[in-house]
Amino acid sequence: MDPIAADKAHSWHPFTPMADWCAPEHEPLALVSGEGALLRDSAGREYLDGNSSIWTNLHGHRHPAIDAAIRAQLDRVAHTSFLGFTHPPAAELARQLVALWPADTLSRVFFSDDGSTAVEVALKMALQCWRQREQPQRQVFVSFRDAYHGDTLGAASLGGIDLFKGAFHHGLNVTCLPDFAALGQLDARTVAAVIIEPLIQGAAGMRLWPRGLLRELRGWCDEHGVLLILDEVMTGFGRTGTMFACEQEGVVPDFIALAKGLTGGYLPLAATLTTERVFETFLGGPERALYYGHSYTANQLGCAAALASLAIFREENVLVALQPKIAHLTDLLAAMRRDPRVYEVRQCGFIAGMELRHPDGTPFPAADRTGARVCLAARRHGLLTRPVRDTLVLLPPYCITEAQLGQCVAALELAIVEICGAA
């Protein structure tokens, strides 16, 4: 059976209006190979991977070091249970992740599968931690407007975007605040933890937090004895220009959720890091254990890929090499700001969002799906990316060249003209 026909007959794609997808006139793009910042479809056409395959791929496709690490691990074993067993790649990966933080801060690593489960782990740990500290009244989780922390029931209930939250708002006791100032209205004695994406909110349309807010939030949590959870699923591993976004404000959380780029974009793997102080509340009899885990927790292939990715950071001096590319992206985006349909350009390191509106500043009707149509038009100019509503998103792999960055921005500029008309 033709792969496209089989897909339309049997697949169900995430975040996709399936009536449009299955329509006879729709021709899905089938991606079959890649190298570096490029992807190729089944017809042999090449595209720049403008969103790093949904914000995951850090070093490019088919990086020889990660390929070799996975092949070497396959020669040993692909997967073994982590429930009551261990293995060298997971133990070494945990050690290296902890070593990325100041001594005596984040010292324990719990592995899971993806960003949603990394957040779920932090939520369960926080609630059980307070119960075992004999403060069961601390049951409230605080999130912020336009937040997105995943799609599993607990993570979705934290959300501040109705489109993604849907009916999943009864999973936890959650207070979603409009801004930082609203923290003063809370009874902090009932708060288990506050969760935030540091520096920038991804699914909100790449919206930037005010500088200094994260440091203030850490201070509020310390003052009131509240745990701080940082969701660095998107921002972790160099995406903002530092290994972790929270470094830019000198903040160390009580929990950090990591996924997406952890394996360099190769395999599903997530990690939740926490402190020894939290870990110690789970010591004692069996009733204090954390009864949570997945079949593929700490899978050996994923751990091998993650170790190879961390080695690339060290051996290729990735963060230093990234700085001139971040500066070049800033220069390229400056030209886009002059287009009257580009309402706002938001950049944080190697993350960029370009919000489209009418020239008078009024939003395009949601039914027009302007952002999606612009991204679809950009394919004709060799760029693959996906918008957040009418915000065009650019998060390329770190290996992309400055010339290729220019091609990405040029493709978006041409696509805007095609869909919105000449400025």
Image (spheres, rainbow, N blue to C red):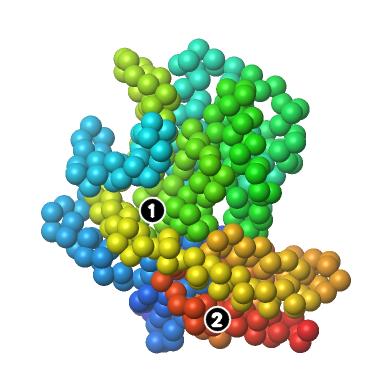
Looking at this rendering, what residue extends furthest in the right direction?
360
> Residue 263: percent from the left, percent from the top?
35, 56
Above or below for 201 versus 399: above
In which image quadrant can residue 10 be found?
bottom left
- When the figure is inspected, residue 261 is found, relative to residue 250, above or below; the finding is below
Q: Quadrant of the N terminus?
A: bottom left
Circle 2 SS class = helix
Residue type, numbered disc 1:
Leu
Q: Position of residue 337 (x, y in %)?
A: 72, 73
Residue at the left extreme, as displayed: 75
Q: Which mark is residue 195?
A: none
Tag 1 or tag 2, which sits nearer the N-term?
1
Q: Is residue 233 left or right of residue 303?
A: right
Q: Residue sitting at 66 percent across and 63 percent down?
A: 346
> Residue 176, can we see it?
yes
Tell me the distance, in whole angstroms, between the alpha carbons under discs 2 and 1: 27 Å
Q: Which residue is mark 2?
A: 406
Nearest to the eye among marks 2 and 1: give it.
2
In this view of the protein, can residue 30 be seen by the observer? no
Please provide percent x and percent y for residue 20. Answer: 60, 71
Q: Pick out the residue farthest to the top.
A: 134
Q: Nearer the viewer, residue 321 or 232?
A: 321
The three-letter code of the residue at mark 2 reads: Gly
